[in-house]
Amino acid sequence: MTDSAFVVVRPGALTTVQDLGRIGHAHLGVPRSGALDQPAHRLANRLVGNAEGAATLETTLTGCAVRLRRPATVAVTGAPCPVTVDGRPVAWGGPVRVPSGALLEAGAAAHGVRSYVAFDGGVEAEPVLGSRATDVLSGLGPAPLADGAVLRLGRPGGPVPAVDAVPHRGVAPELVLPVVLGPRDDWFTPAALRTLSTGDFRVSAASNRIGLRTEGPSLERARDGELASEGMALGALQVPPDGRPVLFLADHPTTGGYPVVGVVPERYLAAAGQAVPGTPVRFTPLGRPSWGPPARRTAPDGG
Amino acid sequence: MTLRTLPVGEHGLLIELDSGEAAEALHAELLRRAAARRLPAVREIVPAARTVFLDGLADPGRLAAELPGWRIPPLDRGDSEIVEVPVRYDGPDLAAVAERWGVPPEEAVRIHSGAEFRVAFCGFAPGFGYLTGLPERFHVPRHATPRTRVPVGAVALAGGYTGVYPRSSPGGWQLIGTTDAVLWDTEREPAALFTPGTRVRFVAVSDGAIPEGAAP
């Protein structure tokens, strides 16, 4: 059978359709969503001649396999993994021509968590509020890939660039996350802010697209009571009652009632989306922006 | 009005006010300025209980410096259309809520359906609005242990807020009724029936009866 589509043969642990996410709907309770490793998603699209906003597949640790129903140029980026077409090894990180009827498989990640599979023309799911991204928190967008599901492909657009393969960024032995302190760093004791910059944190296995959870020391609050619900940023480091910081990723809730000790700028979040459970995490507080209320003298690394 | 500005990362600004009403007034002013192109480019404007969060600002410090000089008119409650939501007051917590209020259940229904609400902000799930409008003496706590499943359309109370579950989910609010109104429909513009600032009235109906002119 030939049509512009592919059939899911092996969905893997969690494979979702992702793009650049839903911007501008947070006031309705709609998370941003979108690819966790945006540079990898954009690169995969560029390698097959797509616009960067075309939808790709985002895998989780174990890859996925699909059978093409039309010839396609594909590229796999993000977490390095063996890539095969009908069982024959092909390039990771470069454009690969796959004939109609062939089985394309992205294998288990050698390191990292999420690989991105781009097809020329993009994955053609019905957009919801301007995006095709699967949002695992609110259930918006296409369902995660399931055995036997058929997903459509768009019409191929631009020419495929002349590259053979791109280098991988390499494996970082630890996840370093710069943190802009605030808005609620004053809810924590000076000792807690020192712990944030010196503590031995690790990526928890309970992490997902909503947030990267940490194991390790807990941050002690300087005050009791509840914070009224307030808007939450992508990259917010929210501290629930157990004191262990949670880094908000793409599918994070738009409002929340636990204090945010600091915010990790967006450009560092791709690495967070690729950190496997057990990876050491080092937070490096950047102080507060110069216009904000003055950082306390006890704040780590000055303000 | 006192106003505190707090940094949220490199491009975010959290504006904290001393009341929910002040936050709603500031949110309305931000929307007016955005519509008149008198607000710097911003990706999100997210009102909440006592704050408004702006994200995606090129220079949050500059806006933070300007804000204290703004004249922010008090909230105008009178001019917009009211969304009427038909409710069967049949929730499993209605009797307990009435008892907490010290009234019989029929009177609790009259109190709730007699109040005018306003969507202060959204969160928790797409289309879930936090509606203010009940006087403080009618505030109720949430359940210590949330229900694992609250049905779609459940009309519920927690703190000073009324909310309607746009889809089935776990939830800790006190359930007082059910509505067939569609809270969230991505084919509709806007997808949410309750957007921040929307005025809402709950209309008591018996099974199946929809009053004329009510919301779908």
Image (cartoon, grey):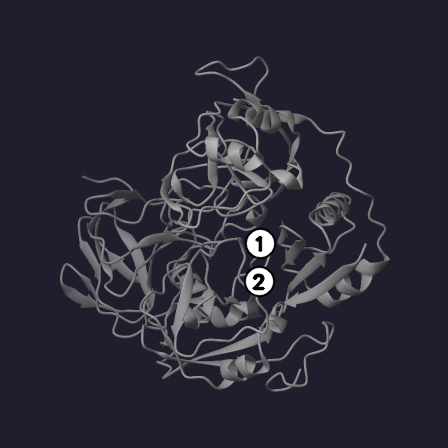
The front one of A96 and A200 is A200
Find residue A108 and report its horizontal and vertical position in percent. 22, 67
According to the picture, the residue beneath numbered tag 1 turns out to be: A229
Find residue A110 and report its horizontal and vertical position in percent. 25, 74
The front one of B31 and A86 is B31
What amino acid is found at the position of numbered circle 1 in the picture?
Ser
Q: Residues within 10 Å of mark 1 (few under 14, many from 20)?
A: many
What amino acid is found at the position of numbered circle 2 in the picture?
Gly
Please, which chain is the residue tagged with disc 1 on?
A: A
At mark 2, the secondary structure is loop
Instruction: Locate residue B205 relative to residue A100 in the image: left or right.
Output: right
The front one of A69 and B204 is B204
Instruction: Locate residue A52 relative to residue B79 in the image: left or right.
Output: left
Q: Can residue B125 be seen here?
A: yes
Image quadrant in which the C terminus of chain A is located: bottom right
Please, which chain is the residue tagged with disc 2 on?
A: A
The front one of B204 and B211 is B204
Against A81, residue B180 (above or below) is above
Residue at (63% x, 60% y) in the render: B56
Residue B132, image quadrant: top right
Find residue A214 and report its horizontal and vertical position in percent. 40, 72
At mark 1, the secondary structure is loop
Against A213, residue A154 (above or below) is above
Residue at (59% x, 59% y) in the render: A227
Mark pair 1, 2: CA separation: 13 Å
Image quadrant in which the N terminus of chain A is located: top left
According to the picture, the residue beneath numbered tag 2 turns out to be: A225
Find residue B94 and report its horizontal and vertical position in percent. 48, 31
Between label 1 and label 2, give the one nearer the viewer. Answer: 2
Residue B78, image quadrant: top right
